[in-house]
Amino acid sequence: MRTDSWKAQPIRAAMGGGSMVSAVAANLREARTAVGSRSTAALARCFGERAILPGDPRYEAARRVWNGMIDRRPLAVLRCTGNEDVRAALDFAAEVDVPVAVRGGGHSVAGHGVVDGGIVIDLSPMATVTVDPSNSIADAGGGTQWGEFDAATQRHGLATTGGLISHTGISGLTLGGGFGWLTRKHGLSCDNLIEAEVVCVDGRVLRASPEENAELYWALRGGGGNFGVVTRFRYRLHHLGPNVLCGTIAFARASTRDVLRRYRDVMATAPDELAAYMTFGTLPDGERAIVLTTLYAGPAEDGAGWMERLRRCGTPLADLVASRPYTDFQKSLDGSQYAGRRAYWKSSFLSGLSDEAIDMAITCAAELPARDAILNIERYGGAASRVPPEATAFPHRDSEYLINIMSVWDDPERDGANVGWARESWAAMAPFVQSRSYSNFLGDEGQSRVREAFGVNFDRLATIKARFDPGNRLCVNQNIVPTSGAMTNIEETK
């Protein structure tokens, strides 16, 4: 795990003492006058080697994000070590009037961790995790990845809902909602966020919690990165592990219809502890199969019977369910998802899994365009569905299933085939869809899709956006345009 503290090394000191504000202001004034170069020299003085500019040998790697389809060239990548760095980066971007992208883990499929001609606020140095086991809470910096978080919390037999890929950043996943193996048992990642530290575009550093800046806190739990740069997340933790009953069961593709119907029946009465996803995919030997991936978030002896019921969904080709470390299972899907591969996703919520929906999913997955293309059906519900739609900014609470259509590939010449398959499959599933947008899986698809993603909460989010970012400086995201005429810079009620 990276050990850089999320507490800032004051940039004032880095500039040789005196007033940081006046020093930064002087540099920013110089930046504004240096129109041709965008004052990259001023950036270098403020951030030193932590400013990565075009021409720097590190620039090509620094501008890359997880999705290899994204090819953008920022003005600068600023590796921030704390709140003061973030404030300085926001000030600089405002002074020279360029867009800002915030990068936590860089795992956004839409590539929102980088922007052409703008400033990337790279939070990767802010990746410490501090666990308080007696109170079952953990603080994590905005650049932390889930693998780092899980390693720290599992030393105490604790966990919270996190992403399925260990190198996903906690920041983007949590702010957009956050699905994982513990969603049914403990809710979404955002449901387990109990406090955040936020650097606002006007330079304020705010604590957001149910007691302080409550509207901001509400918006951060599912509203994405629209409201400020979150530099610290505090999570509620739950007892789990270190070993859990988990693994995969593969069934022959020819039996898919019956397998999915039986899976649907098992999950209709399953306890919250049971997570089980069905995936149309390709086995290591090249055979197409329907693969069940499952975890029981409780005592293994309680989960054994449920695993047996899942096995009876069909005749297993392979059965790899066993007791193993939770941290290992959290990395089990990493193999095909390494950085630099090309990726395109579509996602929708389903009110149920009818026979007709099953048949259409089978049709869509009949010809996968890449070895690592998948169509995935996840049973939702449990604790996440008991949260009212307006209790957090994440509105999708009453769906029974989530369907994910994902392709990952390497050859740019296969872009059309992979993107086309995902779009066509997503359109074909439309008759069975309750809601068509999960913000973390959206590309840059326009305001109508953004409105759909935030649903009944969109108008409230737009009003909060106007309070904290009235000029829409933070727009490299699933953007909520601020409500015009709303009050700004108001003090939140306690």
Image (spheres, rainbow, N blue to C red):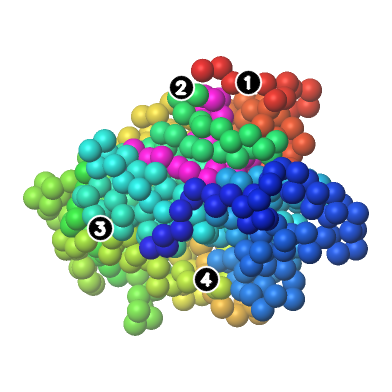
Residue drawn where x is 67% and y is 72% of the image: 59
Furthest-bottom residue in view? 285
Amino acid at pointer 1: Glu
Spatial CA span between label 3 and label 4:
23 Å
Residue drawn where x is 70% and y is 25% of the image: 489
Q: Which residue is mark 4?
A: 339
Q: Secondary structure at mark 1?
A: loop
Q: Is residue 359 magenta?
A: no
Q: Residues within 10 Å of mark 2 (few under 14, many from 20)?
A: few
Amino acid at pointer 3: Tyr
Q: Which residue is mark 1?
A: 491
**Residue 259 picture location, percent across and down:** 29, 58
- Indicate which label's residue lies in the foreground, 4 or 2: 2
- Indicate which label's residue lies in the foreground, 4 or 1: 1
Furthest-top residue in view? 493
- Quarter of the view holding residue 194: top left
Spatial CA span between label 4 and label 1:
41 Å
Q: Which residue is mark 3?
A: 326
Q: Which residue is mark 2?
A: 211
Spatial CA span between label 4 and label 2:
39 Å
